[in-house]
Amino acid sequence: MNKAQLIAKVAEKTETKKQAQEIVELILDTIKSTLKKREPVAISGFGTFRVKETKPRTGRNPKTGETIQIPAKKKLSFRASKELKSIII
């Protein structure tokens, strides 16, 4: 399912497609802005989005065998709730 299909599904329960699009956009923008502040977003019955920071580490270039320094970075993480896992598995 892509964003347009999600909006169409929400539109089935709302008055207009424009209203559904505004709702979906508002939810996504709120999640993005919360994650940008490095705060987790927990949606009960669905899961938790959070930003994790990795530490810098030493790695090896597989082509040359040369030792390289891998910089620290931020990664987006999602952990599904038990309820969501039970539906999928």
Image: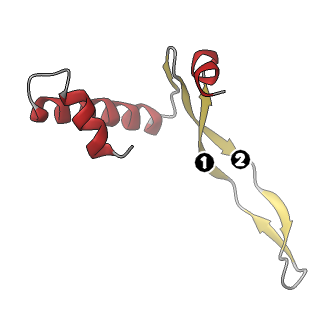
Task: Check disc 2: other Cα within 10 Å, few if <14, some if 14-19, many if 20+.
Answer: few
Residue 51: which quarter of the image? top right
In percent of width and height, residue 71 lies at 70, 60
Q: Is residue 23 above or below residue 2?
A: above
Which residue reaches farthest right?
65
Q: In the rendering, which numbered label is found on residue 54?
A: 2
| Whole-number angstrom distance, CA of label 1 to CA of label 2 | 6 Å
Left or right: 70 as drawn, with respect to 14: right
Instruction: Give the labeled residue for mark 1.
Output: 74
Task: Check disc 1: other Cα within 10 Å, few if <14, some if 14-19, many if 20+.
Answer: few
Identify the residue shown where x is 24% and y is 36%: 7
Q: Is residue 16 shown to the viewer in this render?
A: yes
Query: Which quadrant holds the N terminus?
Result: top left
In percent of width and height, residue 43 lies at 47, 19
Q: Earlier in the sequence, mark 1 or mark 2?
A: 2
Identify the residue shown where x is 75% and y is 63%: 70
Callout 1 amino acid: Lys
In percent of width and height, residue 34 lies at 42, 31
Identify the residue shown where x is 46% and y is 35%: 35
Left or right: 71 as drawn, with respect to 32: right
